[in-house]
Image (cartoon, rainbow, N blue to C red):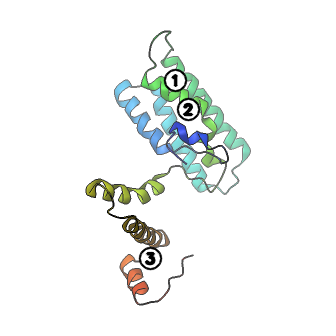
Amino acid sequence: MHDHWTPYFKYDDCTHALCNVHHLREFKGIIEFENQQWAKDMTELLLEAKTYSEETEYPLPRDKVQEFGQRYQTIIEEGYLANPLKAHEKNTDPVRLLNRLSKRQEEVLEFLYQVEVPFDNNLAERDVRMTKTKQKISGCFRTEKGAHCFARIRGFISTCQKQGLTIIESIETILRGNTIQFS
């Protein structure tokens, strides 16, 4: 799962999924600055599909997934009608977004096909955020060993959080020489 950075698509031995929170942010901008209905409709569709995928057992019914796909395509068509392509002019932000969404529909809706694929990559971004913050504040890690230690500690804390464990108690357990069983 990623934010549609083009070089990621060079990895062709995996399934790609696109972060829909990134899309929702872009829709919000188009709604606020351009007041375009298609962006409102796509926001509603993606949020409805997210809720449906969270409340329904996988595999999701094929007819319902196809319905979401058809509605998606209709909204894209409405978006192009609201943003006609003009020869010899640079594409606007809405047109660039429509082009990406049109080309990558399967990746946008991947969360409907596989239970393992989340709607967004917020969890992954949160896991990386502390490392990037540390790097920004300090400018860099002083040593490679320091970077490895930081990554191990952050990974442990992140795993404890995901497992619903108290971080301080987990650290105390490890420092006492005991092990923690993660599920």
* Left or right of residue 94, residue 10 in this image: right
N-term-proximal mark, 1 vs 2:
1
Label 1 – label 2 distance at C-alpha: 11 Å
Dots 1, 2 in contact, CB < 8 A? yes
Where disc 2 sits, the SS reads helix
Label 3 – label 2 distance at C-alpha: 39 Å
* Residue 162 higher or lower than 9, as above or below: below
Identify the residue under disc 1. Answer: 79
Which residue is found at the position 52% from the left and 23% from the top?
Answer: 79
* Residue 7 higher or lower than 122, as above or below: above
Residue sitting at the far right = 62
Which residue is found at the position 44% from the left and 70% from the top?
Answer: 152
Q: Which of 20 and 65 is in front in this view?
A: 20
Identify the residue under disc 3. Answer: 165
N-term-proximal mark, 3 vs 2:
2
Q: Tell me the quarter of the picture where residue 57 sits.
A: bottom right
* Left or right of residue 23, residue 68 in this image: right
Residue type marked 1: Gly
On the image, the x and y values in percent for residue 18 come to: 55, 43
Q: Which mark is residue 6?
A: none
Q: How many labels does the image show?
A: 3
